[in-house]
Image (cartoon, grey):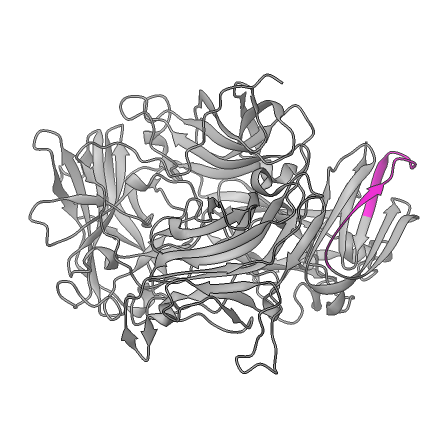
Amino acid sequence: MKKLTLLLMLLSFVVLSYGQKIKPSTSIEPYSSYEKKMDVPDESRLKAEGEIFFSETFNWKDASSPRGWTLPAGWQIVDQTDLGTPWIWRAGTDSIRGRWTFEKGHKYSKTPEDGFLVIPMDEYNYVDGIQTDIYATCYVQLPSIDCSAHPTVVLKMRQYFRCNPASNVKLLISNDQGGHWATYSMAYETTINIFCKNPFVEVNITDVAAGMPNVWIRLVWDNMRYYFWAIDDLTLSEAFNNEIQLERPWLYMTDLEEDGDEGFTYMVPASQAGTDGFGGYTFKAGFLNAGRDDQESCFLNAEVFKNGVSVYNQNSVARDIWALQRDTFPITNQFIPDGYGNYEMVLTAKQKAVDGIPENNVYKDTYYISDSVYSLSDWDFETYSSTAGFGNNDGDYLGVVFDIKKACEVNSISTLIMQRPENKIASTKPGYSYQYWLFKYDETEATWIELLSSDYMEVTQEMLDKWITLELQKDGESEFLDPGQYIAAIQVFHGGGLGANNSLYRFTIGSDNSHRQSLAKSVYRVITDADVIWYQNRDISMIRMNLKETGAPHSADVVFNVDMTLPVANGYFKPAAGDFVDVAGTFNTWNGSAHHLTDVDGDGIYSLTVPALTTFQNIEYKYRINGNWSTSEFPSGGPNRVYRTSFYNMINDIYNNGASLSVDLNSLTSSINVYPNPTDGEFTLSVTNTQVVDLNILVTNIQGQTVYQNLVKSVLDYQEKIDLTPFAKGMYFLKVNNQVMKLLVK
């Protein structure tokens, strides 16, 4: 293979250039914890590729030990600073506390019931309510591992951390008994003081571990005083021969005139989009070759769907990537949106060979062309934003930068005002007050000037955890915006004065952590500054600008699809006997009698279109068998399904989330993945459980005849190849305990 020069992928957020308009923040002071509500990625990203030859779930409980647990033979825990701050074992029900930390445990653990390891630095620095500032360096080291028989080595684990700086959580590997160490950062894109961006770690350590008889592995907390790091479910396995991963996507809202890009924007008014506004999106992604072999003809594909229909499909220039190397692939041909709608952008990493795990080659996000709403963030918060790390004064501001490309009229500003459930004292409370402001950048004076404001408001209980919109006080002139840069901001008042105690006074709003925004677009201003200086914020504050525009649809159809394959396979849904499935929810006052779903093509997917539901409103719903609540989903009273409508709505569900209503809970399987699917006949089955179970693996054809069966006793994670090449092409059904999946042999 021809070796090409590689461009190393940038592993940090893109920061847009605004000259002196926005100053970078220099504050690194800690602020109290928020609980990050992060979506868990599809388990297929974590399935075991190749042989798993080492596994540890940290089941170290020992009732005979005074401390309740015992360190297994060969493991080491070393407190290098010798200050009494070591890694410790915690039961799965134990919390992680301290002055700044309020965690219920390792929230991403796959096996929480048997415990996990943690360095609880906040607890060490907050004994009996007294704050100390000990900086600690400590590590946990695995027993020496023989990798001599393995040509590739991939380390996986589940982590959960918050630290300062994040780059000081490290993985160290030695193959010469500690003479030399290779260092890997576990921070990924995590910055100061926020929760880890990548809780599902997957590191290819082949270059230092493969073929080596004596491999040492350390996890190092390096010279830090705040927060915590928890780990669990650590494995070593082999890699696929051909395995590329899409590690880092960039979605650029293109600025045709000045800056070159605006980063990701969730909702853009139609007046600001198109060829006379921002233009559209361009795309880029970073690839990692995590396989054994060099990968030929790698390229990025970008496809955009408007309301479910493909309207753009472009490929980057193809290049080769060496094993364990990275490269970036740009697509500069712009996508220009055309009218109101949902625009789903799909980035896919592709190469010449068949990829081992195609599920980790894809990144998706959606933005909307609206009439009036202009927003970086979506509707739902992941974290919290405040000025606690930057002064926490009465009168400080949080803001978002908006570029206006076409003259328009502004109406109002909206903010998601939050109260942190884990620490209501140190967050927004009734009686706090606030005011919205709109600032414009004056190019002549090189400063931000006040343009408009809202009424001064006091927080009531009804405002908490809601988007609050306030009209701006118009003067007949200032509300008409010329092209330029503006900041929509909230000025917050909590009664604590200047430099208020963060643990008692804090005005909190929502922060969006689910998209790849540019950090330079979210800003704050400290009231004690003599000049109007805005600094780059660490959080994506959830603040919107609303224009005086109309025209977007106010209602849209919603298509409900529910997979009934498992209920049919287990015999508690019998369409041939007259059974039916309906959907009941807030949109039909929880009476689904007139909302029966049908399976026209006989594929086990039942569908129904409900017309004219209000756009951008939450609906709650459940599916039921025969209109009976006792045979509905989640019959024990589990949570309703929740969906936010938009211009295009295609809902795809699995009845009861794939949990069988007729199978004992002890036989539940957390996740099954089959790849490739479709295939010529050979499939790889990967099973991930939260506890050790017996697996009953069954494959039947479409006539219900068994073509393969296997019973596997007492496993946690399991993988095997299933060969259906001797059988006819067509549809098959794979059932693993309570889970059913369709297989297609081409």
**Residue 423 in sight:** no
Image quarter of residue 508: bottom left
Residue 159 % position (x, y)? 51, 56
Is residue 215 on the magenta stretch? no
Is residue 731 on the magenta stretch? yes
- Left or right: 6, with 667 as reference point: left
- Foreground residue, 338 or 381? 381
The quarter of the picture where the N terminus appears is: top right
- Foreground residue, 435 or 524? 524
- Residues in magenta, as a range: 716-733
- Left or right: 328, with 99 as reference point: right
* Residue at 54 percent of width and 28 percent of height: 303
The quarter of the picture where the C terminus appears is: top right
- Left or right: 422, with 239 as reference point: left
* Residue at 84 percent of width and 60 percent of height: 571
Residue 313 % position (x, y)? 55, 23
**Which residue is most to the top?**
2
- Left or right: 568, with 658 as reference point: right
Residue 226 % position (x, y)? 34, 62
In the rendered image of this protein, does residue 293 appear above or below residue 589?
A: above
- Foreground residue, 555 or 293? 293
* Residue at 68 percent of width and 44 percent of height: 148
In the rendered image of this protein, does residue 436 appear above or below residue 56?
A: above
Give the number of callouts. 0
Dominant secondary structure of the magenta stretch? strand
In the rendered image of this protein, does residue 504 appear above or below residue 682?
A: below
